[in-house]
Image (spheres, grey):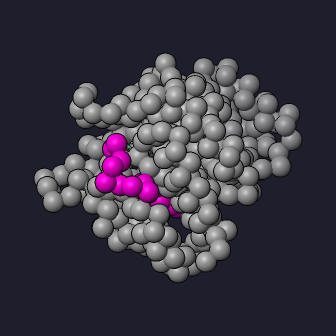
Amino acid sequence: MVIIMDVNAPQENVEKVKEKIFAVGCKPHIIVGSQKLAIGLTGPTEAIDEEEFQLMDFVEEVLRVSKKYKLVSREVKSEDSIIQFGEHSIGGKELGIIAGPCSVENRDQIFTIAGKLKEMGINFFRAGAYKPRSSPYSFQGLKEKGLQILAEAKKEFDIKIVTEAMDSDTLDIVAEVADVVQIGARNMQNYSLLEKCGKIKKPVLLKRGMAATVEDLLMSAEYIVSNGNFNVILCERGIKTFETYTRNTLDLNAVPVIKKHTHLPIIVDPSHGIGIWEKVPAMSMAAVAAGADGLIIEVHHDPEHAMSDGYQSLTPKTFKKLLEKLEQLAPIVDKELKLLCEK
Ligand code: PEP
Ligand code: MN
């Protein structure tokens, strides 16, 4: 259920509605739009008599939300959510580009790649300190040492760090360094971790599970939002299908469909989506054409010697070429690529 009020409603009226919501055993969630203020209700809403709220004269409308996810749905908030990072944003007009290697390998590697990306005007840097690997014998990441290197790079290059948290035990230390906490595909349905992500103060990048439907993804986002963190960025990263010529099948259908059902931003990971570096530029362009709010792309200065995912990593040179094309494509889909690079 959602209660609609004017965005300029006096705080005391908002408080009155909140009190009533608590009194009926539900939890209020305030969602501020440009014209309207929505108060989403979670909890045992079926038993509520809508009239109780409708009769309050400052309540404009009471809506029942039919979906299994509520706070993330467009029914509750029709405008796109924009996640602001200083002068940059993910969602809205700006095309958000997150780039960097799969893993933190050492300080030199991170400083080399971050330096090259920063020169190109990239502001969001990705690299995993905790790595979820299919084999227990593969490189598992530098863990705390990796976070330390990322913290140093953040200071040196003034970049926003996007890095993965793999479990509840390490979520807080990851969130200290990260500007965006990534929840990987394998953890998309780790509900206790998602609940904990709802309580942190950093935006969360939630990747779609490899066998998860769009509805599953939106319900997972709801776990985070209903626990108090509205700053969720969704990510399509490819799903498992019968196809073997590519690592995954990048489901670009999901982009416009997700845009229809939720106000949250959706970005695309073409690197994991196709898994072949030569094909990453084509799928990046396709993702932007489909309406994605941004891209997360693996870039490594020496892909042949990368400790993970080298075969799907662009070099800084090939990545720069792609950026130049994206700069031309962005205005066609009403987006803007805000790069500070000198060409
Ligand atoms: C990654 O981003 O390096 C990663 C492990 O992604 P995913 O969870 O999508 O497999
Ligand atoms: Mn990777």
Q: Is residue 99 left or right of residue 13?
A: left
Residue 206 shown in magenta = no
Along the line of sight, the residue nearer the viewer: 139 or 132: 139
Q: Is residue 271 left or right of residue 263?
A: left
Residue 194 in view: no
Q: Is residue 119 left or right of residue 243?
A: right
How many circles with numbers are drawn on the protein?
0
Q: Is residue 200 left or right of residue 313?
A: right
Q: Please provide percent x and percent y for residue 3.
A: 65, 41
Q: Please provide percent x and percent y for residue 152.
A: 63, 39
Along the line of sight, the residue nearer the viewer: 50 or 185: 185
Residue at position x 58%, y 44% in the image:
161
Q: Is residue 244 above or below residue 228?
A: below
The quadrant the N terminus occupies is top right
Residue at position x 57%, y 79% in the image:
331
**Residue located farthest toward the front when viewing the structure as drawn:** 108
Along the line of sight, the residue nearer the viewer: 92 or 100: 100
Magenta span: 293-308
Residue 294 shown in magenta = yes
Q: Please provide percent x and percent y for residue 31.
A: 67, 43
Residue 89 in view: yes
The quarter of the displayed image where residue 245 is located: bottom left
Q: Please provide percent x and percent y for residue 339.
A: 63, 68
Residue at position x 33%, y 44% in the image:
308
Along the line of sight, the residue nearer the viewer: 228 or 143: 143
The quadrant the C terminus occupies is bottom right
